[in-house]
Amino acid sequence: MALTIRQINATKPGTKIITLSDGMGLELRISTNGSRGWRLRYTRPNGKRNMISLGQYPEVSLAEAREKRTDMRRLISQGIDPVEQKQSDKRQRQYATENTFEVLAMEWHAAMVPRWKESSKRANDSRRVLEMYVFPKVGNRPIESILPLEWLDILRTLEELGKFEQRRRLHAFCRDIYRFAIITGRASCQLQPPYRPSNGA
């Protein structure tokens, strides 16, 4: 029989782990310390049995656990292992977080500072112009997701303010950051450097 919220709340922890089944592989495991965790037992595409955690009750409600079960079973029907998919999604999120423009820009800046030790002004200027005009707009975005026209808009903003030298420097800095991203394997070779205004230097 399917679980009910009343049954879940009425079941108290014991001296051993208690397992309540909701059917189709979905279980609620109640540990001896009272924590309650959803688990889904399933068969991998290769035929081996496996289990995946779906979160803790009551943070994940009975209805939400059933929705997750449906999603997992849909993946399985497509020949996708939910555990492998979960790990892949985690890697992609981590990759996106570690490859934002700001993260790459600051790594590039740290690598360049020793070369600029004879000119601290250049180090300060490069960081300042990035912090003022780039990071607020696209700093938290993966570098490969930033569109060329977005760069054009940033550079044109500086042009409209009459800051032509800062525009020129910013374009050069961003171009080098793109190269740094490609060299360090965080961006594909097809990634294009930022656009500049057609009449820009």
Image (cartoon, grey):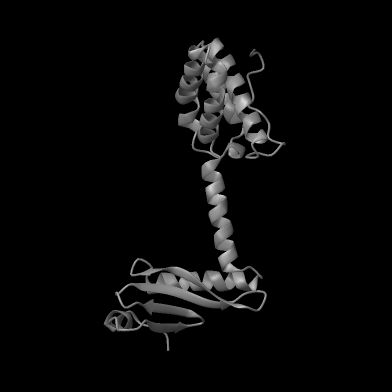
- The residue nearer to you, when weighing 183 against 118, is 118
* Residue plotted at (30% across, 84% down): 15
Q: Residue furthest right?
A: 190
User: Considering depth in this image, is 135 or 173 the residue closer to the camera?
Assistant: 173
Q: Report the number of numbered marks.
A: 0
Q: Is residue 78 left or right of residue 51?
A: right
On screen, residue 111 above or below 81: above
Relative placement, left or right, of 74 versus 34 is right
Where the N terminus falls, by quadrant? bottom left
The residue sitting at 50% across, 18% down in the picture is: 123
Q: Give the side of residue 169 with respect to residue 191, left or right.
A: left
Residue at the extreme bottom: 1
Instruction: Give the vertical position of 194 relative to 25 (above or below).
Output: above
From the viewer's side, name the closer residue of 52 and 154.
52
Tell which of 160 and 103 is nearer to you.
Answer: 103
Which x, y percent locates residue 201? Answer: 64, 12
Q: Quadrant of residue 43?
A: bottom right
Quick check: 101 above or below 89?
Answer: above
> Which image quadrant is residue 176 in?
top right
Q: Position of residue 32 (x, y in %)?
A: 31, 78
Relative to 80, residue 186 above or below: above
> Percent position (x, y) of residue 13?
29, 81
Residue at image x 45%, y 69%?
A: 54
